[in-house]
Amino acid sequence: MTTQTQLSAYDLVAERRSFVSDTGIVLMRELRPMLHDPFSVLFSLVQPIFFLALFGPLLSGNLGGGVPGGDVWQWFVPAILVMTSLFGSSVVGSNLLYEMQTGAHERMLVTPLSRSAQLVGRALKEIVTLLAQAALIVLVMLPFGFTLYPVGAVLGLALLGVLGVGLGSLSYALAIAVRKQDWMFWVVQQTVLFPVMILSGMLLPLDGGPGWMRALSSVNPLTYVVEAERALFAGDLANTDVLWGAVAAGLTALIGLTVGIRAMQGSAG
């Protein structure tokens, strides 16, 4: 009995080591194209920079002191970071669709790498990309009056990483689900993306909106993440919005990983 218990414990440790090493292999495979072409990270910042350059001044001119907290950039920049995570993580499934069309995904499935590690490794790659983009956006905005609170910023980036894992995993699961009708990926992604973004209060405060919009916003997990990012980047670490944002991001990651791993394990069919 004791011997069986020891063997089971040994097998469990070995399995965990295998999962960690497999995840590392997949992560490096996914990072290699970005390391060979780091300018791709810069080009991916075009969209958030446009929002900051064109939408930010409109907010400043039309809302001014009406923005919660009174400072437009302290209110808008954290929201743009969440937008970067939302847009970047929600499209990563298209890369998996391409791999399925070219047969690269099937070749990965026949390797000894565990399928759970194949999903988690891909999701972790999105964290690296997301954190690099977020750091660059913050650095760009510093000369324009954005105030950086280092501890809050680090915690805010960590929260974005958790959210990115969840969104990326859901995107991979969607790609696997619609792999025989790949056009459906973009239909679903675009249909979900914009309502979720607008109803999070990311671009405009929803306090003056109709009741049904405020009701939908209250059940939108992204709303809580956006508010948590604003509190963290304002240095208000004890704000209860941070707690609710962490819960929302954690649940998104948990659901995303659960759905994504199950989809990856069944993707050979």
Image (cartoon, rainbow, N blue to C red):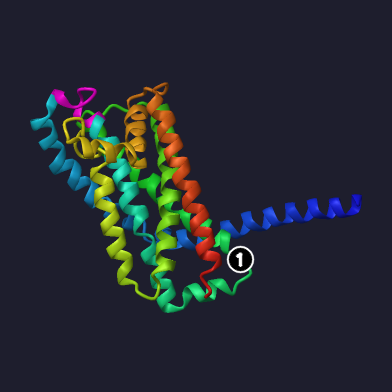
- Image coordinates of residue 11 in percent, x first then y, are 77, 56
Q: Is residue 26 among the parts visible in the rendering?
A: no
- In this view, the residue in front, 210 or 123, is 210
- Image coordinates of residue 1 in percent, x first then y, are 91, 52
- The residue sitting at 15% across, 23% down in the picture is 65
Asked if residue 68 is among those painted magenta in the image, a careful observer would answer yes
Query: Left or right of 208: which side holds 191?
Result: right
Label 1 sits on what residue type? Leu
Seen from this angle, which residue lies furthest left?
61
Secondary element under disc 1, as helix, strand or loop, is loop
Q: Residues within 10 Å of mark 1 (few under 14, many from 20)?
A: some
- Image coordinates of residue 246 in percent, x first then y, are 44, 35
- The residue sitting at 40% across, 66% down in the picture is 175
- Image coordinates of residue 152 in percent, x first then y, are 40, 28
Residue under numbered circle 1: 113
- In this view, the residue in front, 34 or 229, is 229
- In this view, the residue in front, 214 or 62, is 214
- The residue sitting at 35% across, 74% down in the picture is 181
Q: Image height check: is 121 above or below 203? A: below
Query: Left or right of 223: which side holds 13?
Result: right
Query: Left or right of 110: which side holds 33?
Result: left
Residue extent of the magenta highlight: 65-74
